[in-house]
Image (cartoon, helix red, strand yellow):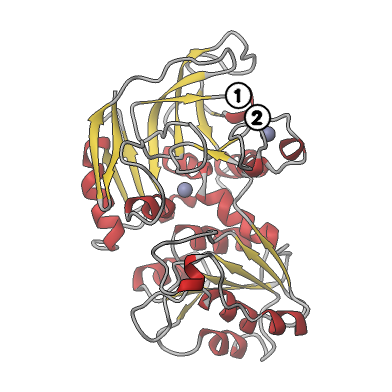
Amino acid sequence: MKAVVYKEPFKVAVEEVPDPRMEHPNDVIVRVTSTAICGSDLHMYEGRTAAEPGIVFGHENMGIVEEVGDGVTSIRQGDRVVMPFNVACGFCKNCVAGYTGFCLTVNPGFAGGAYGYVAMGPFIGGQAERLRVPYADFNCLKLPPGDEHETDFILLADIFPTGYHGCELAQVSPGESVAVYGGGPVGLMAAYSALLRGASKVFVVDRVAERLQKAEQIGAIPINFTERNPAEQIKEQTGGEGPDKGVDAVGYQAQAHTEEREEPAIVLNSLIDTVRPTAMLGIPGLYVPADPGAPDESAKRGQLLVSVGRAFEKGLRLGTGQCNVKRYNRQLRDLIIEDRAKPSFVVSHELPLDQAPMAYEKFDKRVEGYTKVILHPQG
Ligand code: ZN
Ligand code: ZN
């Protein structure tokens, strides 16, 4: 089958790789109809991880079930399904508690598994014609047959639940004000989720005009951090005290406010500054325990200069970690089915798999409006 294969920093190729095979009676094989490129794929693409050449990318996948193992009971051939990017067993302590992003059995020595991602286990990515899904009863979410809402449903694999998770970590409640740092796909999904949860006022902080426009389009208030200190801009619009909740949808590759350089702790520190005392922060933005590409020695070891004293003084509470997609994907699917949510407004391009090398290059450079790309392996 054809698949997107990592070759070297800043280079992927579409190549022939072996078809996935059934490895266990609980597996299914899915013919991939949609698979998305994610901002976190760029960490590997840019060579900032230990990803080895030859890895097949793709953790945001949906398609039609083609083969079903004898041990699978709820999924049938021909079912249309979307898979959480987390690969999870369903029976370990963390899975049972709903923390499927931290499954203890699928990736020995590490809490959590994912398709096509360095250090996240042996699971081959879905930017390919076919995908093997382990523990299929647990990891497949069934969708209505046909092709309706395809571009909305693919976002259930990661970014819609991940944005929602940011709001859940911050416990965003009706009537509250929320500052979302980052207007990329996850930040926009966090802002959208805050509005779905009944927030009264949602701010989206970024500097890219198209992102700020999209934020405004969904009813959020755009804040351009290059114009003036974003914390001040937001405080002015929340009675001087700051919003009730904050979401960090940027992570460690954050950019300094006034110049073109990375400043890994700037979003955390800005959020601590922005929100009102006793606020809660949700941090779904990615931070890593080591980053060879970081701008200073301590950041290379994953240690950032965060204003802990200020956070303590304000009595802030914070929640971190990757999204447990399965905790939200069913409910978010039903909002899509009932036309109460339409997350596909973040999708900028839909392309055949063959065009992945070009799409990666343009998405990485953030040119020509490449913000969220969906690949269709079946043409
Ligand atoms: Zn993703
Ligand atoms: Zn588990």
At horizontal 62% and vertical 11% (from top left) the residue drawn is 71
Q: Foreground residue, 272 or 103?
A: 103
- Please say whether residue 359 is visible from this viewpoint: yes
Give residue 85's position: percent from left, percent from top.
52, 40
What is the three-letter code of the residue carrying label 2? Cys
Specify the quadrant that holds the C terminus. top left
Give residue 358's position: percent from left, percent from top.
21, 48
Q: Quadrant of residue 369?
A: bottom left
Q: With respect to residue 38, does 17 lie above or below?
A: above
**What residue is shown with label 2?**
89
Q: Quadrant of residue 232?
A: bottom right
**What residue is shown with label 1?**
135
Mark 1 and mark 2 residues within 8 Å of each other at the beta carbon:
yes
Q: Foreground residue, 145 or 142?
A: 142
Q: With respect to residue 212, does 275 lie above or below?
A: below
Q: Foreground residue, 281 or 372?
A: 281
Mark 2, ligand 2, within 8 Å: the answer is: yes
Going from N to C along the chain, the mark reached first, 1 or 2, is 2
Give residue 67's position: percent from left, percent from top.
47, 13
- Please say whether residue 250 is visible from this viewpoint: no
Q: Residues within 10 Å of mark 2 (few under 14, many from 20)?
A: many
At horizontal 61% and vertical 42% (from top left) the residue drawn is 110
What is the three-letter code of the residue carrying label 1? Tyr
Q: With respect to residue 16, does 225 lie above or below?
A: below
Decide if residue 210 is on the left or right side of residue 271: left
Decide if residue 188 is on the left or right side of residue 356: right
Decide if residue 61 is on the left or right side of residue 259: right
